[in-house]
Image (cartoon, rainbow, N blue to C red):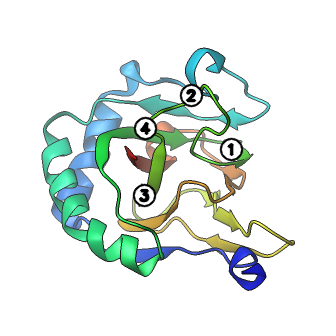
Amino acid sequence: MRAALTRSPHRLFPGFLGDELAAAILAHALSNQARMKPTKVGFGDQIRRDESIRSSIVLRDLGPFLAPVMERVDACEPELLHALGMRPFTRSHVQVELVAHGDGGFYRRHIDTATGSGNQKQPRRLTMVWYAHQRPKAFSGGALRLHALMGDAFTDIEPAHDLMVAFPSWMPHEVMPVSVPGGRLEDSRFAMNIWLCGS
């Protein structure tokens, strides 16, 4: 049991959406810059903006691209749960957001699901993070750091274009600081966060 707690279970899917859909989603984010808002942290009545914990901007409307993304997610979910050693669950809903980390962006160590009584009755179970960026890449940093539950072990994953990373929502993780020398939105580290929730 202890050995399992010192690992960081995850799966990688390079080329998850394909060039055409990946480019379209990136263009969608850029064309909706005016609608992007500062990200927040917390759950329920504890949701708040705290740039000492998380610094990025978010768009929660995927428009016509939500359906093809979810088609791909649905297709790989059973395989993912098995590979990650997770029990199947009854999905209640899905949460999706597009996030841009610009110059100085980061997200300190956290988990994606609420804990404790009185929190979500249908918590986040499976986290999927998909990455996109302009090519050639104009930012540096921004690795996804997955922490083990015990000890100091971690795994860093570089945010490669059209890479999807999946891991249990209880796994501690963080976004390492991002550097965007030009400071332009189009040069940012873009990520689509997908949370499968249920019981």
Cα–Cα span, label 2 and label 3? 18 Å
Residue of label 3: 128
Mark 2 or mark 3: which is in front?
3
Residue of label 1: 107
Q: Are marks 4 and 1 in contact (CB under 8 Å)?
A: no
Residue of label 2: 39
Determine whether the residue tagged by mark 1 lies in a helix, strand or loop: strand
| Residue 166 marker | none
The quadrant holding residue 113 is top right
Cα–Cα span, label 4 and label 1? 24 Å
Cα–Cα span, label 2 and label 1? 10 Å
Q: Which residue is rendered at x = 36% and y = 30% of the image?
A: 60
Identified by mark 3, the residue type is Met
Identified by mark 1, the residue type is Tyr
Determine whether the residue tagged by mark 4 lies in a helix, strand or loop: loop
Mark 3 or mark 4: which is in front?
4
